Image (cartoon, rainbow, N blue to C red):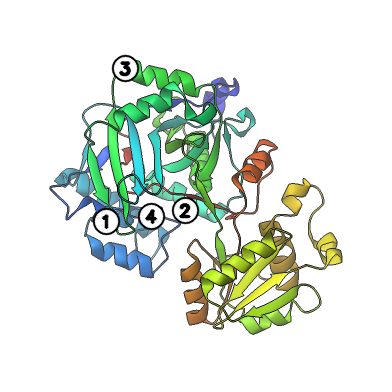
Amino acid sequence: MNTAGHSEAKAPRGLELTPFRGLRYDPDRVGSLAAVTSPPYDVVVRPDGLHHLQSADPHNIVRLILPEAATPEERNAQAAATLRRWRREGVLTADPEPGLYVYEQRDGEGGEGMVQRGLIGLLRVSDPDEQVVLPHEDVMPHIVADRADLMRATSANLEPLLLTYRGGDGGATATADLIERTALRPPLLATTTEDGVHHRLWSVTDPSELATVQKELTGHQALIADGHHRWATYRRLRAEHPSPSPWDHGLVLLVDTARYPLRVRAIHRLLHHVPVADAVAALDGRFRVRRLDVPQAEAMDLLAGAASVGNAFLLAGDGAFHLVDRPDPALLARTVPTDRPEAWRTLDATVLHATLLDHVWQVPDTPAHIAYIHDTAATVAKAERDGGTGVLLHPVHEDVVRDLARQGVTMPRKSTSFGPKPASGLVLRALDL
């Protein structure tokens, strides 16, 4: 591992966002821009969602971010060959000059509903001790290794990760003003994905405007909202290549949450080999369990109420919901590590992993035993279909996430889902450009 080339990164420099020549689909070469996009790789519910996206268009981005083949080596080689072919055939073409990209997501018509805007660019990959980019969740080494292999094979950043920072009060900054002005111009692309979200993209190439943004961002640090594994991958690949190199930077979407607050949702668990009856039986005398024969929305409301006063979960998979709350304090004292702040010790995700999964249910945190699913209905449906147990969580507040990150404390992996997430396939980065 080469680290000699990175000594200059030790001085705190804040966020350094660099323009790049984006690689984008030629709308004349694909069925529609919406049909070639995808949610981020870890949100696609495999295999159902993967096959649905593959059939939407032969050039859908999932053929690059989630290639299918018999072995990991074959998958990565296939993705690299597909990317080369699409570039050669003009399906993907590079923009003529470097820029930062203003990206807008909007749901609802006529100004109603959510609007989020941010900047897509290349961020300097900083070291953890710089406290420039703050992770808040642990990562799974095998996923980092998998993403690193894919990025090496394709020599590309195929989808941006999502970072947030806090601009001025109410988001009144020069960067915010530039984003708002840019959004008044005709976009490079506009499309509406099947979830009803409208996406628009603009390029900012004016040197003075770019300099203004870059100067302002150097005074800020960012929180990883979505993409911990990709950030860890960026850091691994940067360490492997002597600096300076294209691997010194990674593709990100940067959103000012003072101007555009993100939604925070929970990520649910599916226990493949634990039937609901067994999961409930093991909780006897350890947690309170109440069966709820109510619709999903009502059950989630009851979960929210219980989670507001203590640790609470919903179990699903047998046609009903089971509200699990009021853990035995002695059980928590025995099973939850005491070497971290109280805000971490009392997280639902901490209690789920340290107490329920490790101690009560004794389920290993491996893909063979646990799936992580963002969508509530999909978790319930898969649990019922597979005979497993869906464990539904209530989301944690963003302020708790940010405060823990600033203390250098990471939450259990897949504790939160910030959104809306950027659609994959709107702009890519090839390292040879």
Distance in Å between CA atoms under marks 1 and 4: 11 Å
Whichever of labels 2 and 1 marks the residue nearer the N terminus, that label is: 1
Distance in Å between CA atoms under marks 2 and 1: 20 Å
In which quadrant of the rendered view does residue 292 lie?
A: bottom right
Tag 2 near tag 4, CB within 8 Å: no
**Label 4 Cα crowd, 10 Å radius (few <14 / some 14-19 / many 20+):** some
The residue under the point 18% across, 47% down is 91
220 or 243, which lies in front?
220
Which is more foreground, mark 2 or mark 1? 1
Q: Secondary structure at mark 4?
A: loop
**Residue 170 in sight from this viewpoint:** yes
Q: Position of residue 70 (x, y in %)?
A: 37, 66
Please determine whether, in this image, residue 71 is positioned above or below residue 283: above
Which is more foreground, mark 1 or mark 4? 4
In the picture of the structure, the residue carrying the numbered disc 4 is 39
The residue under the point 51% across, 22% down is 218
Can you tell which mark lies on residue 207? 3
The residue under the point 38% across, 55% down is 39
Q: Position of residue 29 (x, y in %)?
A: 14, 49
14 or 68, which lies in front?
14
Q: Position of residue 179 (x, y in %)?
A: 36, 29
Q: Secondary structure at mark 2?
A: helix
- The amino acid type found where label 4 is placed reads Pro
Which is more foreground, mark 2 or mark 4? 4
In the picture of the structure, the residue carrying the numbered disc 2 is 146
- The amino acid type found where label 1 is placed reads Asn
Quadrant showing the N terminus: top right
Whichever of labels 1 and 3 marks the residue nearer the N terminus, that label is: 1
